[in-house]
Amino acid sequence: MPRLWHFTAEYLLLLPAGAAIALIWANNSPASYFRTTLRIEFFVNDVAMVLFFALITKEVVEATVAGGVLHPWRRAVLPLVAAVGVTTVPLLVFAAVVPLFDEPRVIQGWPAVFAVDLAVGYLVVRIIFRRGPVVPFFLLVGICANALGVLALGATAAIPIHLTRFLFLMGTAIGAAVVLRAQHIRSFWPYLLIPGILSWSALYLGGFEPALALVPVLPFVPHGRRDPGFFVDASPEAHDPLSRFERWARHPAQVALFLFGLVNAGVPLSSLYWGMWSLPIALFVAKPVGLLAGVRAATLMGFHLPHGLGWRELVVVGFVSAIGFTVALFFAAAVLPAGPTLSAIRMGALLSIAGAALAIGAAASLRCGRFHE
Protein backbone atom coordinates (compact mmCIF):
# COMPACT_ATOMS: atom_id res chain seq x y z
CA MET A 1 0.00 0.00 0.00
CA PRO A 2 2.78 2.55 0.72
CA ARG A 3 4.35 1.82 -2.69
CA LEU A 4 0.97 2.11 -4.39
CA TRP A 5 0.28 5.42 -2.63
CA HIS A 6 3.73 6.75 -3.61
CA PHE A 7 3.10 5.86 -7.26
CA THR A 8 -0.37 7.41 -7.15
CA ALA A 9 0.94 10.58 -5.52
CA GLU A 10 3.93 10.91 -7.86
CA TYR A 11 1.75 10.87 -10.96
CA LEU A 12 -1.25 12.72 -9.45
CA LEU A 13 -3.57 9.81 -10.27
CA LEU A 14 -6.13 10.85 -7.65
CA LEU A 15 -7.21 13.72 -9.92
CA PRO A 16 -8.35 11.54 -12.86
CA ALA A 17 -9.82 9.09 -10.35
CA GLY A 18 -11.98 11.86 -8.90
CA ALA A 19 -12.93 13.04 -12.38
CA ALA A 20 -13.98 9.53 -13.44
CA ILE A 21 -16.17 9.15 -10.34
CA ALA A 22 -17.70 12.57 -11.04
CA LEU A 23 -18.61 11.64 -14.62
CA ILE A 24 -20.25 8.38 -13.56
CA TRP A 25 -22.06 10.00 -10.63
CA ALA A 26 -23.29 13.04 -12.59
CA ASN A 27 -24.71 10.89 -15.39
CA ASN A 28 -26.39 8.32 -13.17
CA SER A 29 -27.68 10.47 -10.31
CA PRO A 30 -27.32 14.13 -11.30
CA ALA A 31 -29.51 15.52 -8.54
CA SER A 32 -27.46 13.79 -5.85
CA TYR A 33 -24.16 14.77 -7.49
CA PHE A 34 -24.89 18.47 -7.88
CA ARG A 35 -26.49 18.70 -4.45
CA THR A 36 -23.40 17.18 -2.83
CA THR A 37 -20.72 19.02 -4.78
CA LEU A 38 -22.45 22.36 -4.36
CA ARG A 39 -21.92 22.07 -0.61
CA ILE A 40 -18.17 21.51 -0.83
CA GLU A 41 -17.33 23.43 -4.02
CA PHE A 42 -16.09 26.57 -2.28
CA PHE A 43 -13.90 24.69 0.19
CA VAL A 44 -12.35 22.51 -2.51
CA ASN A 45 -11.79 25.09 -5.26
CA ASP A 46 -10.87 28.11 -3.17
CA VAL A 47 -9.29 26.65 -0.03
CA ALA A 48 -7.97 23.11 -0.46
CA MET A 49 -6.40 23.75 -3.87
CA VAL A 50 -4.18 26.40 -2.26
CA LEU A 51 -1.89 23.52 -1.25
CA PHE A 52 -1.48 22.15 -4.77
CA PHE A 53 -0.64 25.51 -6.31
CA ALA A 54 1.73 26.14 -3.40
CA LEU A 55 3.65 22.94 -4.15
CA ILE A 56 3.87 23.93 -7.82
CA THR A 57 5.22 27.34 -6.77
CA LYS A 58 7.72 25.70 -4.44
CA GLU A 59 9.20 23.71 -7.31
CA VAL A 60 9.41 26.76 -9.55
CA VAL A 61 11.11 28.79 -6.79
CA GLU A 62 13.75 26.10 -6.28
CA ALA A 63 14.28 25.77 -10.04
CA THR A 64 15.34 29.42 -10.23
CA VAL A 65 18.18 29.16 -7.68
CA ALA A 66 21.80 28.49 -8.66
CA GLY A 67 22.03 25.19 -10.51
CA GLY A 68 18.30 25.11 -11.22
CA VAL A 69 16.95 24.51 -14.71
CA LEU A 70 15.45 28.02 -14.79
CA HIS A 71 18.63 29.82 -13.73
CA PRO A 72 19.66 32.51 -14.69
CA TRP A 73 16.73 34.90 -14.85
CA ARG A 74 16.63 35.04 -18.66
CA ARG A 75 15.55 31.41 -18.74
CA ALA A 76 12.84 32.09 -16.16
CA VAL A 77 11.40 35.08 -18.05
CA LEU A 78 11.08 33.31 -21.39
CA PRO A 79 8.06 31.18 -20.30
CA LEU A 80 6.31 34.38 -19.22
CA VAL A 81 6.59 35.79 -22.74
CA ALA A 82 5.69 32.42 -24.29
CA ALA A 83 2.45 32.34 -22.28
CA VAL A 84 1.22 35.37 -24.22
CA GLY A 85 1.44 33.36 -27.45
CA VAL A 86 -0.18 30.35 -25.78
CA THR A 87 -3.25 32.47 -24.97
CA THR A 88 -3.64 35.04 -27.76
CA VAL A 89 -3.25 32.75 -30.79
CA PRO A 90 -5.86 30.20 -29.55
CA LEU A 91 -8.21 33.07 -28.72
CA LEU A 92 -8.06 34.30 -32.33
CA VAL A 93 -8.64 30.79 -33.66
CA PHE A 94 -11.54 30.26 -31.23
CA ALA A 95 -13.21 33.45 -32.48
CA ALA A 96 -12.83 32.19 -36.06
CA VAL A 97 -14.06 28.65 -35.34
CA VAL A 98 -17.20 29.41 -33.32
CA PRO A 99 -19.24 30.78 -36.27
CA LEU A 100 -18.63 27.56 -38.21
CA PHE A 101 -20.84 25.61 -35.78
CA ASP A 102 -23.74 28.08 -35.91
CA GLU A 103 -23.82 28.55 -32.13
CA PRO A 104 -22.59 32.13 -31.69
CA ARG A 105 -23.30 32.28 -27.95
CA VAL A 106 -20.43 29.88 -27.34
CA ILE A 107 -18.06 32.81 -27.91
CA GLN A 108 -19.11 34.05 -24.44
CA GLY A 109 -16.96 31.31 -22.96
CA TRP A 110 -13.75 32.72 -24.45
CA PRO A 111 -11.83 32.93 -21.13
CA ALA A 112 -11.76 29.11 -21.12
CA VAL A 113 -9.25 29.32 -24.00
CA PHE A 114 -6.67 30.68 -21.55
CA ALA A 115 -6.89 27.66 -19.25
CA VAL A 116 -4.01 25.23 -18.79
CA ASP A 117 -4.67 22.32 -16.45
CA LEU A 118 -1.48 22.16 -14.38
CA ALA A 119 -2.29 18.90 -12.60
CA VAL A 120 -3.18 16.80 -15.65
CA GLY A 121 -0.54 18.57 -17.74
CA TYR A 122 2.11 17.84 -15.13
CA LEU A 123 1.08 14.17 -15.16
CA VAL A 124 1.44 14.00 -18.95
CA VAL A 125 4.76 15.86 -19.01
CA ARG A 126 6.16 13.56 -16.32
CA ILE A 127 5.06 10.51 -18.29
CA ILE A 128 6.81 11.75 -21.44
CA PHE A 129 9.92 13.48 -20.06
CA ARG A 130 10.20 12.05 -16.53
CA ARG A 131 12.34 15.01 -15.41
CA GLY A 132 14.48 17.80 -16.80
CA PRO A 133 13.86 21.36 -17.98
CA VAL A 134 10.61 20.60 -19.82
CA VAL A 135 8.66 20.05 -16.59
CA PRO A 136 9.33 23.43 -14.94
CA PHE A 137 9.08 25.17 -18.31
CA PHE A 138 5.57 23.80 -18.86
CA LEU A 139 4.49 24.67 -15.33
CA LEU A 140 5.71 28.25 -15.66
CA VAL A 141 3.91 28.65 -18.99
CA GLY A 142 0.76 27.16 -17.49
CA ILE A 143 0.87 29.36 -14.38
CA CYS A 144 1.31 32.49 -16.49
CA ALA A 145 -1.45 31.48 -18.92
CA ASN A 146 -3.86 30.86 -16.04
CA ALA A 147 -2.91 34.21 -14.52
CA LEU A 148 -3.83 35.86 -17.82
CA GLY A 149 -7.07 33.89 -17.69
CA VAL A 150 -7.87 35.31 -14.27
CA LEU A 151 -7.34 38.80 -15.69
CA ALA A 152 -9.62 37.84 -18.60
CA LEU A 153 -12.34 36.95 -16.10
CA GLY A 154 -12.08 40.48 -14.75
CA ALA A 155 -12.42 41.86 -18.27
CA THR A 156 -15.75 40.07 -18.70
CA ALA A 157 -17.21 41.95 -15.71
CA ALA A 158 -18.74 38.65 -14.61
CA ILE A 159 -16.61 38.91 -11.48
CA PRO A 160 -16.38 42.42 -9.99
CA ILE A 161 -12.78 43.50 -9.47
CA HIS A 162 -11.97 45.61 -6.40
CA LEU A 163 -8.46 46.69 -7.33
CA THR A 164 -7.83 49.07 -4.41
CA ARG A 165 -8.82 46.46 -1.85
CA PHE A 166 -6.71 43.85 -3.61
CA LEU A 167 -3.59 46.02 -3.85
CA PHE A 168 -3.78 47.08 -0.20
CA LEU A 169 -4.19 43.57 1.19
CA MET A 170 -1.69 41.99 -1.20
CA GLY A 171 0.86 44.70 -0.42
CA THR A 172 0.35 44.01 3.26
CA ALA A 173 0.77 40.26 2.68
CA ILE A 174 4.02 40.66 0.76
CA GLY A 175 5.27 43.17 3.33
CA ALA A 176 4.56 40.68 6.12
CA ALA A 177 6.43 37.97 4.20
CA VAL A 178 9.42 40.29 3.75
CA VAL A 179 9.46 41.05 7.49
CA LEU A 180 9.29 37.36 8.41
CA ARG A 181 12.19 36.58 6.09
CA ALA A 182 14.22 39.49 7.45
CA GLN A 183 13.66 38.11 10.96
CA HIS A 184 15.05 34.73 9.79
CA ILE A 185 11.90 32.86 10.79
CA ARG A 186 12.69 29.15 10.33
CA SER A 187 9.15 27.77 10.56
CA PHE A 188 6.86 27.79 7.55
CA TRP A 189 3.72 28.19 9.67
CA PRO A 190 4.01 31.98 10.20
CA TYR A 191 4.28 32.43 6.43
CA LEU A 192 1.08 30.42 5.92
CA LEU A 193 -0.90 31.97 8.76
CA ILE A 194 0.01 35.66 8.32
CA PRO A 195 0.95 36.61 4.74
CA GLY A 196 -0.81 33.48 3.42
CA ILE A 197 -4.18 34.43 4.90
CA LEU A 198 -3.71 38.07 3.92
CA SER A 199 -2.93 37.04 0.34
CA TRP A 200 -5.99 34.74 0.24
CA SER A 201 -8.16 37.59 1.51
CA ALA A 202 -6.69 39.97 -1.07
CA LEU A 203 -7.50 37.62 -3.94
CA TYR A 204 -10.94 36.63 -2.64
CA LEU A 205 -12.12 40.12 -1.70
CA GLY A 206 -10.48 41.61 -4.78
CA GLY A 207 -12.38 39.32 -7.14
CA PHE A 208 -9.50 37.03 -8.15
CA GLU A 209 -8.88 33.31 -7.71
CA PRO A 210 -7.95 32.72 -4.02
CA ALA A 211 -6.49 29.27 -4.71
CA LEU A 212 -3.34 31.11 -5.85
CA ALA A 213 -2.90 32.69 -2.41
CA LEU A 214 0.50 31.18 -1.62
CA VAL A 215 2.00 31.86 -5.06
CA PRO A 216 3.24 35.38 -4.12
CA VAL A 217 4.21 34.27 -0.59
CA LEU A 218 6.38 31.17 -1.05
CA PRO A 219 9.23 32.96 -2.88
CA PHE A 220 9.97 34.67 0.46
CA VAL A 221 10.09 31.42 2.46
CA PRO A 222 13.75 30.46 3.14
CA HIS A 223 14.85 27.53 0.99
CA GLY A 224 17.95 25.57 0.06
CA ARG A 225 20.76 27.22 -1.86
CA ARG A 226 20.81 24.55 -4.54
CA ASP A 227 18.02 23.00 -6.57
CA PRO A 228 17.59 19.36 -5.44
CA GLY A 229 15.84 18.54 -8.73
CA PHE A 230 12.42 19.33 -10.09
CA PHE A 231 9.73 17.44 -8.18
CA VAL A 232 12.34 15.47 -6.29
CA ASP A 233 10.94 14.77 -2.82
CA ALA A 234 12.64 16.77 -0.12
CA SER A 235 15.02 14.52 1.82
CA PRO A 236 14.53 14.07 5.57
CA GLU A 237 17.89 15.81 6.04
CA ALA A 238 16.60 19.00 4.38
CA HIS A 239 15.53 21.27 7.24
CA ASP A 240 14.92 24.52 5.35
CA PRO A 241 11.33 25.80 5.82
CA LEU A 242 10.35 25.26 2.18
CA SER A 243 11.35 21.59 2.24
CA ARG A 244 9.53 21.05 5.53
CA PHE A 245 6.43 22.65 4.01
CA GLU A 246 6.62 20.24 1.07
CA ARG A 247 6.79 17.20 3.33
CA TRP A 248 3.82 18.48 5.34
CA ALA A 249 1.60 19.45 2.37
CA ARG A 250 2.32 16.57 -0.01
CA HIS A 251 -0.44 14.19 1.09
CA PRO A 252 -3.18 16.77 1.85
CA ALA A 253 -2.58 18.19 -1.65
CA GLN A 254 -3.30 14.77 -3.16
CA VAL A 255 -6.64 14.63 -1.35
CA ALA A 256 -7.38 18.15 -2.59
CA LEU A 257 -6.72 17.04 -6.19
CA PHE A 258 -9.11 14.10 -5.81
CA LEU A 259 -11.86 16.36 -4.49
CA PHE A 260 -11.13 18.92 -7.22
CA GLY A 261 -11.72 16.33 -9.93
CA LEU A 262 -14.82 15.10 -8.14
CA VAL A 263 -16.34 18.58 -7.83
CA ASN A 264 -15.52 19.97 -11.27
CA ALA A 265 -15.64 17.11 -13.77
CA GLY A 266 -19.27 16.06 -13.37
CA VAL A 267 -20.51 17.02 -16.84
CA PRO A 268 -23.74 15.37 -18.11
CA LEU A 269 -22.95 13.57 -21.35
CA SER A 270 -26.33 14.64 -22.66
CA SER A 271 -24.75 18.07 -23.22
CA LEU A 272 -23.56 17.12 -26.68
CA TYR A 273 -23.90 20.16 -28.92
CA TRP A 274 -21.90 20.96 -32.03
CA GLY A 275 -20.66 24.13 -30.42
CA MET A 276 -18.70 22.08 -27.88
CA TRP A 277 -16.09 21.33 -30.58
CA SER A 278 -15.10 24.98 -30.88
CA LEU A 279 -12.96 24.97 -27.73
CA PRO A 280 -10.95 21.76 -28.30
CA ILE A 281 -10.35 22.57 -31.98
CA ALA A 282 -8.99 26.00 -31.08
CA LEU A 283 -6.82 24.51 -28.35
CA PHE A 284 -5.38 21.62 -30.34
CA VAL A 285 -4.66 23.67 -33.45
CA ALA A 286 -3.45 26.92 -31.94
CA LYS A 287 -1.72 26.14 -28.63
CA PRO A 288 1.39 24.53 -30.20
CA VAL A 289 1.52 27.32 -32.80
CA GLY A 290 1.07 29.97 -30.13
CA LEU A 291 3.80 28.48 -27.96
CA LEU A 292 6.29 28.34 -30.82
CA ALA A 293 5.42 31.91 -31.81
CA GLY A 294 5.75 33.13 -28.22
CA VAL A 295 9.10 31.41 -27.73
CA ARG A 296 10.37 32.82 -31.03
CA ALA A 297 9.36 36.33 -29.97
CA ALA A 298 11.03 35.83 -26.60
CA THR A 299 14.32 34.65 -28.15
CA LEU A 300 14.31 37.66 -30.46
CA MET A 301 14.00 39.79 -27.33
CA GLY A 302 17.19 38.22 -26.00
CA PHE A 303 15.80 35.57 -23.65
CA HIS A 304 17.07 31.99 -23.66
CA LEU A 305 15.52 28.54 -23.62
CA PRO A 306 16.69 26.15 -20.90
CA HIS A 307 19.38 23.72 -22.01
CA GLY A 308 17.94 20.56 -23.56
CA LEU A 309 14.73 22.17 -24.73
CA GLY A 310 14.28 22.53 -28.51
CA TRP A 311 11.49 22.88 -31.03
CA ARG A 312 10.44 19.23 -30.76
CA GLU A 313 9.95 19.52 -27.01
CA LEU A 314 8.09 22.79 -27.54
CA VAL A 315 5.60 21.12 -29.90
CA VAL A 316 4.87 18.48 -27.28
CA VAL A 317 4.49 21.11 -24.54
CA GLY A 318 2.11 22.97 -26.86
CA PHE A 319 -0.20 19.97 -27.02
CA VAL A 320 0.04 19.47 -23.25
CA SER A 321 -0.90 23.14 -22.79
CA ALA A 322 -4.05 22.43 -24.81
CA ILE A 323 -5.42 20.43 -21.87
CA GLY A 324 -7.76 22.92 -20.24
CA PHE A 325 -9.96 20.45 -18.33
CA THR A 326 -10.68 21.50 -14.74
CA VAL A 327 -9.29 25.05 -15.06
CA ALA A 328 -11.38 25.58 -18.19
CA LEU A 329 -14.40 24.28 -16.28
CA PHE A 330 -13.75 26.85 -13.59
CA PHE A 331 -13.31 29.72 -16.06
CA ALA A 332 -16.48 28.72 -17.94
CA ALA A 333 -18.56 28.58 -14.77
CA ALA A 334 -17.25 32.02 -13.79
CA VAL A 335 -18.45 33.76 -16.96
CA LEU A 336 -21.53 31.77 -18.05
CA PRO A 337 -24.86 31.08 -16.36
CA ALA A 338 -26.23 27.56 -16.22
CA GLY A 339 -27.66 26.50 -19.57
CA PRO A 340 -26.79 25.04 -22.98
CA THR A 341 -23.90 27.42 -23.62
CA LEU A 342 -22.19 26.55 -20.35
CA SER A 343 -22.78 22.85 -21.04
CA ALA A 344 -21.16 23.18 -24.47
CA ILE A 345 -18.05 24.86 -23.03
CA ARG A 346 -17.83 22.33 -20.22
CA MET A 347 -18.00 19.46 -22.67
CA GLY A 348 -15.31 21.17 -24.75
CA ALA A 349 -13.17 21.44 -21.63
CA LEU A 350 -13.68 17.75 -20.98
CA LEU A 351 -12.75 16.87 -24.56
CA SER A 352 -9.52 18.86 -24.20
CA ILE A 353 -8.12 15.90 -22.25
CA ALA A 354 -7.42 14.44 -25.70
CA GLY A 355 -4.46 16.83 -25.74
CA ALA A 356 -2.68 14.20 -23.63
CA ALA A 357 -2.95 11.64 -26.42
CA LEU A 358 -1.81 14.21 -28.98
CA ALA A 359 1.18 15.12 -26.83
CA ILE A 360 2.23 11.49 -26.42
CA GLY A 361 1.74 10.89 -30.15
CA ALA A 362 3.80 13.96 -31.00
CA ALA A 363 6.58 12.86 -28.64
CA ALA A 364 6.63 9.41 -30.22
CA SER A 365 6.67 10.84 -33.76
CA LEU A 366 9.37 13.41 -32.98
CA ARG A 367 11.35 10.91 -30.85
CA CYS A 368 11.79 13.09 -27.81
CA GLY A 369 11.47 12.48 -24.10
CA ARG A 370 11.16 8.81 -23.20
CA PHE A 371 10.82 7.99 -26.90
CA HIS A 372 14.29 9.35 -27.69
CA GLU A 373 15.93 6.02 -26.90
Image (spheres, grey):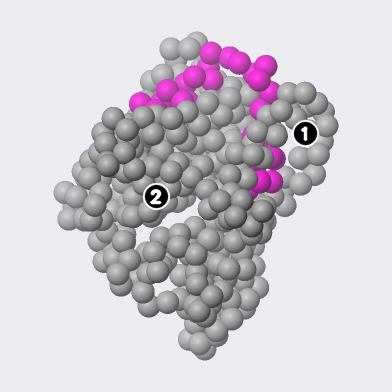
Query: What SS does tag 1 mark?
Result: helix
Residue 282 part of the magenta-drawn span: yes
**Secondary structure of the magenta portion, mostly?**
helix
- Mark 1 or 2: the one toward you: 2
Disc 2 designates what residue?
A: 130
Residue 142 shows in the view: no
Q: Amino acid at mark 2?
A: Arg
Q: Position of residue 344 (x, y in %)?
A: 58, 22
Query: For the magenta stretch, what is the residue range?
Result: 257-285
Residue 255 shows in the view: yes
Disc 1 designates what residue?
A: 34
Residue at point 44% right, 15% down?
Answer: 99
Q: Earlier in the sequence, mark 1 or mark 2?
A: 1
In the picture, the quarter occupied by the C terminus is top left
193 left or right of 104? Answer: right
* Mark number, residue 181: none
Residue 212, picture quadrant: bottom right
Q: Is residue 170 above or below residue 86?
A: below
171 left or right of 84? Answer: right
How many angstroms separate mark 1 from mark 2 (CA)? Answer: 37 Å
Residue 279 part of the magenta-drawn span: yes
Q: Is residue 229 above or below residue 66?
A: above
Q: Position of residue 175 (x, y in %)?
A: 52, 76
Disc 1 crowd, CA 10 A, few/some/many (<14, 14-19, 20+): some
Residue 48, picture quadrant: bottom right
